[in-house]
Amino acid sequence: MERADLYLVRLPLKFGFETSYGRQTHRETLLIRLAGAGLEGWGEAAGVEFPDYTYETAAVSALALERYFLPRVLGRRFTEPKAFVKAYADITGFHFARAGLECAFLDLYCQSRKLPLFRFLGGARTRIPTGISLGIEPRTGQILDRIAAALERGYLRIKVKIKPGRDLAVIAAIRRRFGPILLMADANSAYRLCDASRLKKLDRFQLMMIEQPLAPFDFLGHAQLQKQLSTPICLDEGMVDLDHARAALALRAGRIINVKFGRVGGLLAAKALHDLCRRHRVPAWCGGMLESGIGRAHNLALNTLPHFTLPGDISPSERYWEEDLIEPEVVMERGDLRVREEPGIGHRVVLARVRRHLVAHRAFR
Ligand code: OSB
Ligand code: MG
């Protein structure tokens, strides 16, 4: 690898996105550019700005890459992804950082092989039916309006964020207005096991699943809760690697898994989790992290894998950004996201747009 660039950017979201952790109006994220042999590859460490969903903020990813990961790959030539990942395999943790780094390499590698990234991963489809993840709003009417617009736009499944006090009445209002749509709720760890009787009241609304009701690694609590609920529990925050996923499944902590390539440390790890779910016959789907177009393009490639049979959380660029960082943007047609057949991620990064939102840039040789 001849050169690496880290771009910390802060992108204005088109809408405030509120979860049980709080409300975001901007997305701070880290972009990684690798260059070698006349090509460049891009990746994104789409952590968070404030350590809530994960402690791995974009700033932490930048530090980890600069201090620990980049020195292992700069000045070396890699012909295979396996060898690239092996160069830093002894470094633990920093999943979002290593995911972004691996993504940049895979983009570069696939371009050199003239291979679309999704084909390299083993994906087959070029149209992805998808769902939308809607934040908490101060008034239920606003959520209903957003759902009406999303259904009109062709999203297959609606996910709404919930927290104690913004749950039962909201879900009831949604069912009353929209009837039997594909509906689910994401609690982002906002409940305790002692809230079980409240969560049990959600059963009558026939949700597809309730995502991450309890603390990230409370697999025992989730197992006890799942025993009391007919609604399937889906695990998100705690599914950080295969070991945690295997433990959670063995304990019956949930019946569905949300796969995010950043959380598990890369596309290859995400594919391994996808394969684990398939072997266990556990339904799986791809989550999202409000990525810029760069991470979004990588996530889109991941979404093409065959066992992601439930609609995911990946929306087109225009939902989040006045102007995405890539050309062409990720687009939705008749409810489906389109996967590009060009080599690598198949989208070009517009550096001028990266610079417009730049917080910090560092170049390494
Ligand atoms: O819990 O799935 C989550 C975004 C940031 C952090 C956590 C989550 C989310 C989403 C948004 O739900 C999904 C998206 O549209 O990218
Ligand atoms: Mg979630």
Image (cartoon, rainbow, N blue to C red):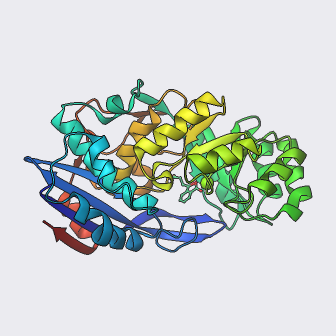
Q: Nearer the viewer, residue 152 or 195?
A: 195
Q: Is residue 159 left or right of residue 105?
A: right
Residue sitting at the far right: 197
Observer able to see residue 168:
yes
Residue sitting at the far left: 38
* Above or below: residue 259 compared with residue 196: above
Q: Is residue 227 left or right of residue 180?
A: right
Say which residue appears at 89% left-offset and 51% top-offset.
201
Q: Percent x, y for residue 311? A: 57, 36
Q: Nearer the viewer, residue 146 or 45?
A: 45
Q: Nearer the viewer, residue 351 or 38?
A: 38
Quarter, ligand 2: bottom right
The quadrant in which residue 157 appears is top right
Q: Percent x, y for residue 178? A: 73, 40
Q: Percent x, y for residue 198? A: 88, 58
Say which residue appears at 45% left-offset and 58% top-offset.
95
Q: Is residue 290 left or right of residue 119?
A: right
Residue sitting at the far front: 90
The quarter of the image holding the C terminus is bottom left
Q: How many marks?
A: 0
Q: Percent x, y for residue 146? A: 60, 52
Observer able to see residue 328:
no
* Above or below: residue 180 compared with residue 102: above
Say which residue appears at 75% left-offset and 34% top-offset.
180
The quarter of the image holding the N terminus is bottom left
The quadrant in which residue 217 appears is bottom right
Say which residue appears at 81% left-offset and 57% top-offset.
221
